[in-house]
């Protein structure tokens, strides 16, 4: 399938037929590889993947910026100014020439008829659906006047709030925070919905969150995929796992759900949700009693091992571990001993596990087990969770000085968020921080001044946050809600103004991953379609209008070139880390950071400089110095509901493309056959899944992959379907997260529901 200048107009107005899309997928072999991901088990790591594109195309370097482990490096093919197709970059051994089905749909995404094309204003009130097209000048005028009016009335802009998250993780997109920095002290929805409890846990143990290169897994002798499903959600990592297995490594999946990764593993161990920490403690006890712990490494590199061992001796009873986790004791012993004997061995922990009320404690317990086994600081070993060690950019777009005389927050120290406050870090004032994981109630409760304006960027609040009814109330009490996005999503329906935003193919940027170690340039491959603008350009337009109305009211540059802004993000440290002399070298393809084994020198950034089994900080903040087992939240309804990510979307992204409906058209609830029988529910029946929070109507699928006593519904988005699993989730916090990210996470998987046939 290809596009020409002539047919783009027709494409954007009418869309591309789903039949064509499916035909394209079939031709590229993507469909034939479902459901195990596009990478095949027999893929050879040494195979040189050729580019498919013909030489007659113009080519550009791009990246997938959508909060996916894999952050693919992309090569984009353009003819006559129109994107024709994309490929995974072949220079990156990680991307290895392939994207997932979502990435392969990028051309369709860019030219989707459903894209936001022009600024629009909802004239009949939020949720009325009465929209009218406005010009950029009108949009900027309304927003700028509102901000200046608020500043005049309140004496500060703390009543203006920004919520932004992972719709685009490109480095220049921190310019959105920069735009808010440049108007004064404001209110930020801070923290992270994704992985906060685990970040805290790893920082308490090791003083950092830093994991080994995933490509090393090919040389691991034992891999535990603990609550992570890369066959669905990090497909590029699977080739290293397959390679290790081919070379004789054992691959074990521990998960409450039998996943795609479990189907590829040497062994699958089903565990009761929320008991993983206890299993890790039991496994540590077993290897210590067997004398298989690494005493030498522990003596040299750890603090508090003695106290930790005393806790295991006294409090951890193996019969109890077996009973609570639901795993036979003989199986636990075999797992622990064989892991300890295989070197190097590694554990990859997913982000679902820490979304429990005891989530951070569970990550600490698993870190401790890996440390006891002597696999921290080793090539192809490690307790893997994620890292930000290639993110040392200048954050030039972020670092804007506040206008002279700005007045900010002086109250008790609030949440800090995961991004520093740039040049104003030493000011007497701070911005005001609200918990991003309690958006609705925080917006409603904020006082002095109350929040009157909300800017939503790179985020679909109504898909990702909790308590829809309260969110509607929160939005309705605001004077002005601005949503800047690429598509007209559920949050846009509750906005006053929507602004159409450029895709990554229409702007410059630079991208790295929180998982692998590659650096990718993102070039502007096509001219922006319709009237879309990059987030940086929007910031510049707002600055221009504010300064026209009141000189000096906004310090953001009044015109920007995304290429120049991108270039400002580089520094000698980045060049040194990636072995390049200039960002221009990235035009030849992505480059990889020089190899470093985390903690190989035995230096940890903890207060003691060692791996801390015993953490004074953990005692101070969370009441327990040691990684102990905290009981998971007590059930408040009959079935536990788990809501993992689907492979068909990234939160609400991609599934909003009409052609995705062909491969995943509607939501389901997955129920164990025994539970279904007890409720007289058959395959395909429509059921109501409900709890104190709300009710969803979905069709039932019966499967043994889900434990009895648990139901599974994907965290996902569907067109023309009000299904949103988060409507059944309350905002109960996980145990950790506030230490490093500014706010605790949400215990999403400690949600309980009931169901009945309709
Ligand atoms: S969604 Fe993930 S795997 Fe798919 S193209 Fe983007 S980064 Fe790659």
Image (cartoon, rainbow, N blue to C red):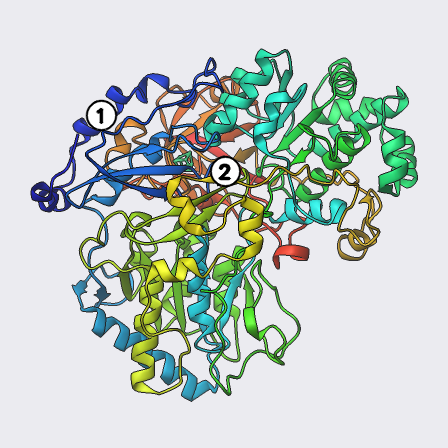
Left or right side of 64 for 19: left
Determine if residue 676 is in view: yes
Quadrant location of residue 87? top left
Mark 2 surroundings: few (<14), some (14-19) or many (≥20) residues within 10 A: some
Work out whether 51 lies above or below 205: above
Measuring 58% from the left and 39% from the top, which residue is drawn there? 351
Ligand 1 picture quarter: top left
Name the spot of residue 257 as percent of width and height, x first: 55, 25
Work out whether 702 lies above or below 164: above
Name the spot of residue 127 as percent of width and height, x first: 28, 60
Tags 2 and 1 touching, CB below 8 Å? no
Task: Tell me the residue that label 1 is attached to.
Answer: 24
Q: CA distance from mark 2 to mark 1?
A: 25 Å
Name the spot of residue 20 as percent of width and height, x first: 17, 28
Position of the N terminus, as image quadrant, is top left
Q: Which mark is residue 69?
A: 2
Mark 1 surroundings: few (<14), some (14-19) or many (≥20) residues within 10 A: some
Measuring 47% from the left and 60% from the top, which residue is drawn there? 440
Q: Which structural element holds mark 1?
A: helix
Which is nearer the eye, 743 or 508? 508
């Amino acid at each position: 399938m290809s596009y020409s200048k002539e047919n783009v107009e027709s494409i954007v107005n009418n869309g591309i037929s789903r039949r064509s899309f499916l035909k394209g997928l079939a031709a590229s072999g993507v469909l034939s590889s479902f459901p195990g991901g596009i990478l095949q088990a027999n893929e050879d790591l040494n195979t040189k993947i050729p580019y498919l594109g013909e030489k007659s195309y113009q080519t550009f370097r791009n990246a997938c910026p959508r909060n996916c482990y894999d952050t693919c490096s992309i090569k984009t093919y353009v003819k006559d100014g129109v994107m024709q197709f994309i490929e995974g970059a072949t220079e990156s051994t990680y991307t290895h020439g392939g994207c997932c089905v979502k990435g392969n749909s990028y051309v369709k995404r860019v030219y989707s008829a459903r894209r936001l094309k022009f600024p629009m204003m909802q004239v009949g009130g939020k949720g009325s659906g009465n929209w009218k097209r406005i010009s950029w000048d009108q949009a900027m005028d309304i927003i700028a006047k509102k901000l200046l009016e608020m500043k005049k009335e309140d004496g500060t802009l703390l009543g203006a709030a920004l919520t932004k998250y992972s719709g685009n993780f490109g480095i220049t997109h921190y310019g959105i925070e920069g735009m808010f920095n440049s108007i004064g002290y404001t209110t930020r929805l801070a923290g992270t919905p994704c992985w906060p409890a685990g970040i805290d846990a790893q920082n308490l143990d090791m003083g950092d969150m830093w994991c080994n290169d995933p490509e090393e897994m090919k040389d691991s002798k034992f891999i535990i995929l603990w609550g992570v499903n890369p066959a669905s959600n990090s497909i590029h990592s699977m080739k290293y796992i397959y390679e290790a297995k081919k070379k004789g490594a054992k691959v074990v999946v521990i998960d409450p759900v039998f996943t795609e990764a479990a189907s590829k593993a040497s062994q699958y161990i089903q565990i009761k949700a929320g008991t993983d920490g206890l299993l890790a403690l039991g496994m540590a006890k077993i290897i210590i009693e067997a004398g298989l712990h690494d005493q030498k490494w522990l003596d040299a590199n750890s603090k508090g091992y003695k106290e930790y061992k005393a806790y295991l001796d006294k409090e951890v009873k193996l019969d109890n571990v077996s009973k609570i986790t639901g795993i036979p004791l003989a199986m636990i012993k075999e797992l622990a001993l064989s892991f300890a004997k295989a070197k190097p061995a590694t554990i990859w922990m997913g982000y679902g596990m820490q979304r429990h009320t005891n989530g951070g404690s569970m990550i600490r317990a698993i870190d401790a087990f890996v440390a006891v086994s002597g696999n921290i600081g080793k090539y192809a070993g490690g307790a893997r969770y994620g890292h930000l060690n290639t993110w040392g950019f200048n954050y030039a777009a972020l670092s804007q000085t506040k206008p002279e005389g700005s007045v900010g927050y002086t109250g008790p120290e609030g949440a800090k968020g995961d991004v520093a406050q740039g040049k104003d870090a030493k000011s007497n004032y701070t911005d005001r921080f609200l918990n991003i994981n309690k958006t609705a109630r925080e917006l409603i409760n904020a006082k002095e001044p109350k929040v009157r304006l909300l800017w939503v960027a790179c985020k679909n609040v109504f898909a990702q946050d909790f308590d829809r009814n309260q969110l509607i109330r929160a939005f309705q009490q605001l004077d002005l809600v601005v949503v800047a996005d690429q598509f007209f999503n559920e949050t846009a329906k509750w906005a006053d103004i929507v602004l159409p935003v450029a895709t990554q193919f229409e702007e410059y940027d630079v991208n790295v991953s929180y998982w692998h170690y590659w650096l990718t340039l993102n070039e502007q491959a096509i001219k922006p379609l319709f009237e879309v603008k990059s987030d940086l350009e929007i910031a510049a337009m707002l600055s221009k209008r504010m300064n026209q109305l009141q000189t000096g009211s906004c310090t953001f540059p009044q015109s920007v070139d995304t290429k120049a802004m991108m270039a400002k993000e580089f520094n000698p440290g980045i060049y040194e880390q990636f072995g390049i002399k200039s960002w221009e070298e990235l035009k030849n393809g992505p480059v990889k950071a020089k190899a470093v084994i985390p903690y190989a020198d035995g230096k940890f950034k903890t207060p003691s400089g060692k791996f801390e089994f015993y953490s004074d900080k953990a005692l101070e903040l969370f009441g327990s110095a040691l990684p102990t087992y905290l009981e998971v939240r007590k059930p408040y309804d009959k079935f536990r509901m788990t809501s993992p990510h689907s492979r068909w979307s990234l939160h609400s992204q991609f599934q909003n493309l009409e052609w995705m409906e062909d491969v995943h058209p509607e939501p389901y609830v997955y129920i164990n056959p025994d539970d279904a029988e007890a409720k007289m529910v058959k395959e395909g029946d429509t059921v109501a899944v409900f709890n104190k929070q709300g009710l969803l109507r979905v069709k039932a699928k019966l499967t043994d992959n889900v434990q009895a006593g648990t139901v599974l519904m994907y965290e996902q988005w569907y067109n023309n379907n009000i299904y949103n699993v988060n409507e059944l989730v309350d905002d109960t916090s996980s145990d950790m997260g506030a230490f490093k990210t500014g706010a605790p996470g949400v215990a999403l998987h400690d949600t309980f529901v009931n169901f009945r046939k309709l």
